[in-house]
Image (tube, grey):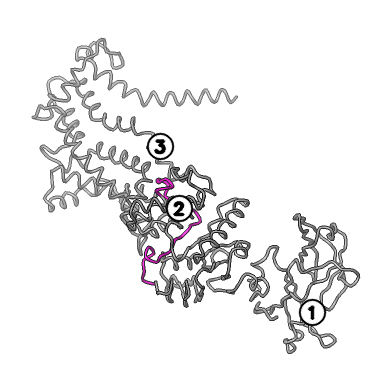
Amino acid sequence: MGALAIKNVTKSFGDTHILKGIDIEIESGQFLILVGPSGCGKSTLMNIIAGLESPTTGEVHIGGRVVNNVAPKDRDIAMVFQSYALYPTMNVRQNIAFGMETRGVPKKEQDEIIARVAKMLQMDHLLDRKPSQLSGGQRQRVAMGRALARDPILFLFDEPLSNLDAKLRVEMRTEIKQLHHRLKTTIVYVTHDQIEAMTLGDKIAVMKDGVIQQFGSPQEIYDQPANLFVASFIGSPSMNFIPCHLAEQDGQLGVSLQSEGEARFIALPQAAKLTGSVGKKVILGIRPEQFDVVGEQGLACKVHLTEPTGPDTMVLTQLNGIEVCARLHPREAKGPGDTVRLQPDVSKAVLFDAESEARLA
Amino acid sequence: MPKFWRGALYAALLVAALYYLLPLYVMVVTSLKTMDQIRAGNLLSLPTSISFEAWGKAWSSACTGVDCGGLQPFFWNSVRMVIPAVLISTTLGALNGYVLSKWRFRGSELTFALILFGVFIPFQVVLLPMAQTLGWFGIANSIAGLVTVHVIYGLASTTLFFRNYYVSIPDELIKAARLDGAGFWRIFLRIIIPMSTPIIMVVLIWQFTQIWNDFLFGVVFSAGDSKPITVGLNNLANTSTSVKEYNVDMSAALIAALPTILVYVFAGKYFVRGLTAGAVKG
């Protein structure tokens, strides 16, 4: 039985359509990521799952029951907010206890739960402090503790890490993942950060303009993006999009890449089914790490700029008149003005229709 | 010459401060003089001996019209008017502000705009319709009537204060509380009110000052034994006797002003803190 199912959910305010028919279903224990740029409707969808907003049409199922008309408190869910939303006048203990108090959990049981949660998140020493006396990371921890105390069948995380500094964000990310491994509770996690989406998710729903662009595992989304938007949104640095025309040479379909006045035909075995479309304008998508430095057979590319990151060096050059980024081993990267001979690993390259932006191959 | 300008600035401020403090000085010294001293000295001279006789008279035996019981009954009238009026208008303002900022409904912005309109309605405009209404309710010329008038008139400002303060409280807090199972009242009483100390202080001081110092509503909507202190003071000062007792008049004015001065002295810091609390998010 699915832990969470969203069936054809729409949300409109008058003529403004925030969500245009969302369908998602995940299994119990899965970690679902809703990712997309701001304004894509992911937070609205989260609020609908939580019951803080109601859908215009469609159904939300949690743990196998339709919850459209169930109040947030009765949906057996717990939520962690971006701003943490800790009650500022209560100390940590009272913050965690507030929900249990409302639900009428006996005082003794409350104390046991608080002790257990505090131990799990290593925040025993913070229990008597006010939220204003805590650091960002500690507040985040308390917010998670408050959710854990609820022991729900579904956790909702609404951009929980976006107010933290970079280092802490990575630490908390790992911690959330460990927590999920330990608790095995279903989690829905909203983020605009594609790295969080990739590292945490069992399933990712990439959203844009109120529509799910692609729903799949992180690797599927990364390797077989459904369209140009998904391909550009997931992965950093972004996938390179090189405009070309589909061509045929020696009975093979492929595209031509030009650099420094030199053109080279690149055969694309995965494009074989597109025989009818020779001459069509397409966009070749190649991720930065899919370039190799090779000998004479490579395409001579002039390096415009290098961005060393430590393990890799990003080399910026041009292909077909478009800026292209190649992620190279620092040993192979040359300096600006030098020439590197690059060969794309075409087995993982993808082709998009230049007009519809959907993936062709 | 920044030093020169700084000096000039302080001089100007000093003059302004003196200008404002001089009347208070005159009132205080005059109230402590006897009539003989007043006749002998000038307006600014210090009393040769301090006498609280005028204060005593103003409080309990000065004549206001035909009654000669001092300001005392008027003072207690004002107390009996101001306490319920301040508490009720503050409570309702907090509730209004909470609803208009955190439980928006269709038309809530319009409702707020209309309530806001009340801040700009001059007292004089509502006098006649209000008198009629109080008559219909059967509370004309009573303290209950005055309380009602002040509550209704104060609602616009108290709502404005609370609404603007609550707008800066993140909505996620309300969402979190709803997920925790709290409803309208529990969120209000357990989450919102404990966060409201600064703005409650502001509104209490504001309302107290407004209502205590009000003269117009007091003089129009009260009669006989329900008159507030501002009306009493007016009657006391305007009652013509053979001699004009300046010291008694000044004492009476100070008695009438004392509660608001004390409120500022003891709660003034909250006032400044609360007024800026909404603007600068801490």
Residue A116: mark in rendering: 2
First-in-chain label (2 vs 1)? 2
For badge 2, the amino acid type reads Arg
Q: Residues within 10 Å of mark 2 (few under 14, many from 20)?
A: some
> Is A162 on the left or on the right of B55, as rendered?
right
Which residue has dot 3 on it? Answer: B272
* Residue A160 x %, y %: 53, 57
Residue A213 makes an appearance in the image: no
Q: Read off the magenta span.
A: A68-94
Check the residue under mark 2 and report the chain it is in: A
Which three-letter amino acid code belongs to the residue tagged 1?
Answer: Val
Q: Is residue B100 above or below residue B12?
A: below
Residue plotted at (32% across, 21% down): B25
Do labels 1 and 3 touch, CB within 8 Å?
A: no
Q: Please identify the residue farthest to the left as the structure is shown.
A: B66
Q: Which residue position is annotated with label 1? A: A255
Q: Give the image location of residue A77, x and y in percent.
A: 43, 64
Q: Residue at x 40, y 74 (%)?
A: A65
Nearest the eye: A256 or B214 = A256
Horizontal and vertical percent position of residue B71: 16, 29
Q: Quadrant of residue A265?
A: bottom right
Q: Which of these two is toward me, B144 or A134?
A: A134
SS of the residue under disc 2: helix
Residue at point 39%, 48% (across, down): A94
B139 is within the stretch colored magenta: no
Locate residue A129 relative to residue B223 in the image: left or right: right
Q: Are marks 3 and 2 in contact (CB under 8 Å)?
A: no
